[in-house]
């Protein structure tokens, strides 16, 4: 029995949380799997793998995208931010702190996606209305919290960034 | 939930992309934003031998809003068009439809022309193009052609593009004076595909009478049905019955055909009211 032919690999470079990486990936490698398996950055979670749940949300050149709906080979030369990059010098970011303070997580599986989505939302809209918060996080699913505390956390993070 | 293997091509210019499509034809799929294609690959509902990534092609990310309408290139993301002030002034229906397309994060990546070329009868943008009578520009190694919306959407997921053709742009006509528009839909959850939806435009005479009313539908058939409602909207006709008799929705696990027909009627009334208010400047 012959082994299937080895898939061709593509050499790419990408910057993740400010650190440059060079990696060789098959064309079909999802960015989510590249981060988790090739770069060993397992903070980015994988839920549904078809763009519904939002767990795998990362920032691509500053804009939140689904890493499970992005091929790693297509981000060659681009900059990615993941949940590992939020804390600075061991100190959690304002969004991370607010999620803790407001009990905006229980099991934590969806949390990396929410943190990245909320971080991008507050960069673009530093003082969002409740409606803008709900619209902003509408593409992320959480099966524990019922969302109320997540909305409260985003509100609190916005307030703490203002002071 | 991993995509099957494929040969990846990342051409640097449009002629190179067209050569690849000419060479690989039906075995190739175009990758733009990937927000419809990659789920299909992940679920292995599609297994193209070749993927032609057009994200490196220069000059396809332009939005041009002029007096005649809004022209968008193949790499214009939903979010970019929704933010474009000139496009919103020239054709306000675009921004109103785009805020209903999936979620903000998907809109950062998904492309307007890609949504048209995907020709999903549950998607908003094909209905908008059909309602406004816009066009799609197709390029191949043997030349370019412009296809009217009425000829572009042949059926579910079936655009009039040949396998060797690349949809390089689309054009949405400008809104005429004293006109208004609205997009109304019902979804199970915010951002989901609609069970049914209606895009409507209304044009008024100087004394406020309806001189034109049109509606296009999502989720109730393909190609997206477009109805001229000028007479039905003006008289005392039963609009719901009028619409219900002219669409052929299908049943699936999300809704029965009869419920979709009901929604289409109710949403038509709502959309025409909102479009009329919009035309009167009451929005």
Image (cartoon, coloured by chain):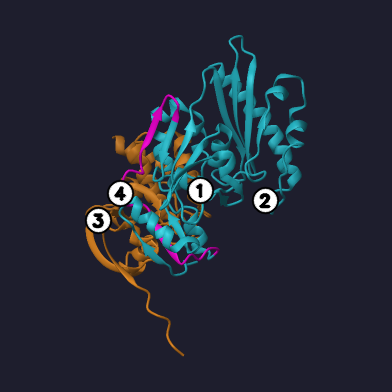
Question: Residue at 65% of width from left, 39% of height from top?
Answer: B225
In the image: residue B219, left or right of residue A76: right
Which residues lie in the magenta part? B45-69
Main SS category, magenta section: loop
Q: In the rendering, which numbered label is found on residue B117?
A: 1
Q: Which chain is orange?
A: A
Is B18 on the left or on the right of A48, as rendered?
A: left
Give percent across and percent down for residue A84.
Answer: 31, 58
* Callouts 4 and 1 on one subunit: no
State which chain disc 1 sits on.
B
B27 with respect to A128 (left or right): right
The correct choice, above or below, for B212 with respect to A28 in the image is: above
Q: Is residue B67 magenta?
A: yes
Q: Are marks 4 and 2 on the same chain?
A: no
Please identify the residue farthest to the bottom as the structure is shown.
A1
Q: Residue B255 versus residue A71: which sits nearer the camera?
A: A71
Chain where mark 3 sits? A
The local secondary structure at tag 3 comes to loop
Q: Are marks 2 and 3 on the same chain?
A: no
Please say if the residues under marks 4 and 2 sit with CB atoms less than 8 Å apart: no
Q: Which residue is mark 3?
A: A90
- Find out whether residue B74 is within the magenta segment: no
Q: Which chain is cyan?
A: B
Instruction: Return the residue at label 2.
Output: B254
Residue B123 screen position, x and y as percent: 56, 44
- According to the picture, the residue beneath numbered tag 4 turns out to be A61
């Amino acid at each position: 029995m012959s082994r299937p032919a080895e898939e061709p690999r593509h050499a790419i470079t990408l910057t993740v949380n400010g650190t440059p990486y060079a990696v060789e990936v098959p064309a079909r490698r999802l960015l989510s799997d590249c981060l988790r398996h090739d770069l060993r950055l397992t903070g980015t979670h994988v839920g549904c793998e078809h763009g519904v749940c939002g767990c795998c949300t990362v920032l691509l050149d500053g804009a939140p995208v689904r890493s499970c709906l992005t091929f790693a080979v297509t981000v060659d030369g681009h900059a990615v931010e993941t949940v590992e990059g939020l804390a600075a010098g061991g100190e959690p970011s304002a969004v991370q702190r607010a999620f803790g303070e407001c009990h905006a997580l229980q099991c934590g599986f969806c949390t990396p996606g929410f943190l990245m989505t909320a971080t991008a939302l507050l960069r673009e809209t530093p003082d969002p209305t409740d409606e803008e918060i709900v619209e902003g996080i509408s593409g992320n699913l959480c099966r524990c919290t019922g969302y109320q505390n997540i909305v409260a956390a985003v509100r609190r993070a916005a307030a703490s960034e203002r002071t | 939930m991993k995509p099957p293997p494929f040969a990846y091509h990342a051409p640097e210019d449009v002629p190179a992309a067209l050569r690849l499509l000419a060479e690989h034809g039906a075995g190739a799929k175009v990758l733009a934003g990937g927000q419809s294609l990659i789920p299909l690959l992940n679920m292995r509902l599609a297994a193209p031998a070749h993927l032609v990534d057009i994200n490196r092609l220069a000059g396809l990310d332009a939005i041009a809003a002029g007096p005649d309408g809004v022209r968008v290139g193949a790499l214009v993301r939903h979010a970019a068009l929704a933010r474009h002030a000139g496009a919103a002034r020239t054709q306000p229906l675009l921004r109103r439809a785009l805020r209903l397309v999936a979620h903000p994060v998907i809109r950062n990546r998904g492309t307007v022309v890609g949504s048209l070329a995907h020709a999903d009868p549950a998607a908003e943008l094909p209905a908008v193009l059909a309602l406004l009578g816009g066009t799609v520009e197709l390029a191949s190694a043997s030349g370019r052609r412009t296809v009217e919306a009425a000829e572009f959407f042949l059926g579910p997921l079936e655009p009039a593009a040949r396998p060797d053709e690349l949809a390089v742009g689309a054009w949405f006509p400008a809104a005429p004076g004293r006109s208004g528009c609205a997009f109304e839909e019902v979804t199970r959850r915010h951002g989901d595909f609609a069970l049914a939806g209606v895009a409507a435009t209304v044009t008024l005479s100087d004394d406020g009478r309806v001189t034109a009313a049109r509606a296009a539908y999502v989720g109730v058939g393909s190609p997206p049905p477009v109805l001229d409602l000028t007479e039905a909207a003006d008289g005392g006709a039963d609009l719901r019955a009028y619409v219900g008799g002219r669409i052929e929705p299908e049943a699936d696990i999300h809704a029965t055909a009869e419920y979709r027909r009901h929604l289409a009627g109710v949403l038509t009334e709502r959309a025409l009211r909102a479009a009329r208010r919009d035309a009167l400047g009451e929005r």
